[in-house]
Amino acid sequence: MKKTLLVSILLIIMALTLAACGASPAPESDSAAQVKIELETTPDPVMVGDAELILLVSDQDGNPIEGASVDVGADHTDMTGMGMHGPATEQGDGRYAINANFSMTGNWMITVYVRQGDLDVKQDISIVVR
Ligand SMILES: [Cu+2]
């Protein structure tokens, strides 16, 4: 009885280990893993009308990436061909800001491009405009 329980526990541990291995992310070949992009908005959540999008760009150690070229696109994913894009203005300390005018409520995809030297990263962030 006791031995059966021990075997069961071992099997469960093995299963967990295998699951953990399977879930671990594949090594990234591009530079996306080296960059963290966070989006802050004013207002939060974004409402129809004017909004400020602030991108917080940092490296894998959490240090701000300064002097990058940051371009931002916004697409109304509920519709085709409704979007806007432009360059964000660097504010220092890894902050890049851009003003946008959201004309409709619904799901919008914010696409952020960060380029600096060899670094060329694109990230999609979905938001809901209320
Ligand atoms: Cu629309």
Image: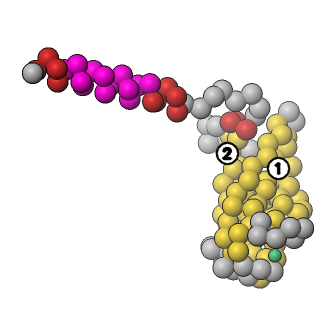
The image quadrant in which ligand 1 is located:
bottom right
Disc 2 is placed on an element classified as strand
- Where is residue 75 drawn, in percent x and y? 81, 65
Mark 1 or mark 2: whose residue is earlier in sequence: 2
Q: What secondary structure is found at the residue carrying circle 1?
A: strand
Instruction: Please tell me which residue is depicted at 82% across the width and 70% down the height of the picture.
Output: 79
Q: CA distance from mark 1 to mark 2?
A: 12 Å
Q: Is residue 92 visible?
A: no
Asked whether residue 78 is in view, the answer is yes
Q: Is residue 100 above or below residue 112?
A: below
Q: How many marks?
A: 2
User: Is the residue marked 1 within 8 Å of ligand 1, measured from its CB?
Assistant: no
Residue 124 is left or right of residue 24, and the answer is right
Identity of the residue drawn at 22% across and 19% down: 7
Query: Which quarter of the figure has residue 5?
Result: top left
Image quarter hosting the C terminus: bottom right
- Percent x, y of residue 51: 75, 75
Residue 62 horizontal/vertical position (percent): 62, 42
Q: Amino acid at mark 2?
A: Lys
Q: Is residue 73 above or below residue 28?
A: below
Most common SS among magenta residues: helix
Residue matched to label 1: 113
Query: What residue would you read off at disc 2?
Result: 36
Numbered range of the magenta stretch: 6-18
